[in-house]
Image (spheres, rainbow, N blue to C red):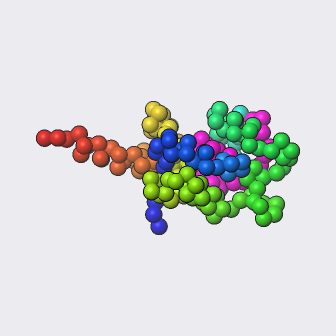
Amino acid sequence: MNEVQPIREKRHINALKKALRGRDLLLFVLGINSGLRISDIRMLKVGDVRDKDFVTIEEKKTGKKKRFFFNSAIKKAVAELVPANASDDDWLFPSRKGNQPITRVRAYGILNEAVERAGLKEKIGTLGCHSLRKTFGYHAYKNGTDLSLLQSIFNHSRQSVTLRYIGINQDRIDEVYANVNL
């Protein structure tokens, strides 16, 4: 199985946003702005996000409590994309097959259908659900977020794990080769 990568180019992020609508756009925006795993995102209810500044969840993978703040992009997406008539008990990402949240497989399909519609298949390849989490980490790091803070956000044991996870190790190695011109 191939390891998924973050979406590195903001222009590719913007192209994907244009290729998505409604629930699917909200899924993408929440994913790239929260750093949460898809297993935690898909279980959110409307009441968890409507008119809120943050939410506290118990991570499915680790069982740890995690509080995450809603930045302006998340707040805007929630305000614009959550149906006004949705109940607080409704799934934020409802399945079209009954009263349940979308599956991980459907989330994967949503992302890759958007890649196709945006014409990015040749540029970014296949996106996995974990690409959203990695995109958050990659851009946070590139914007100057301290590596130890990202390590804590991702619950990683070592900074080297975080660097590899967000795709920075290879970037640094490539820079060494590019900058040694003897």
- Up the image or down, 24 lies above or below 9; here it is below
The image shows residue 25 at horizontal and vertical percentages of 66, 47
Considering depth in this image, is 152 or 80 the residue closer to the camera?
A: 80
Position of 179 with respect to 86 (left or right) is left
Question: Overall secondary structure of the magenta stretch?
Answer: helix
Tell which residue pokes out farthest to the bottom in this image.
Answer: 1
Over which residues does the magenta segment extend?
Answer: 26-52
The image shows residue 96 at horizontal and vertical percentages of 77, 61
- Up the image or down, 52 lies above or below 170; here it is above
Residue in view at x 84 percent, y 46 percent: 86
Quadrant in the rendering for residue 38: bottom right
Considering depth in this image, is 124 or 30 the residue closer to the camera?
A: 124
Considering depth in this image, is 123 or 171 the residue closer to the camera?
A: 123
Position of 13 with respect to 182 (left or right) is right
Considering depth in this image, is 26 or 67 the residue closer to the camera?
A: 26
Count the numbered circles shown: 0
Which corner quadrant holds the C terminus?
Answer: top left
- Up the image or down, 77 lies above or below 165; here it is above
Evaluate whether residue 166 shows in this view: yes
Evaluate whether residue 162 shows in this view: no
The image shows residue 145 at horizontal and vertical percentages of 48, 34
Residue in view at x 46 percent, y 43 percent: 9
Residue in view at x 66 percent, y 38 percent: 74
Task: Specify whether residue 79 is painted magenta.
Answer: no
Task: Specify whether residue 45 is painted magenta.
Answer: yes
Residue in view at x 33 percent, y 44 percent: 172
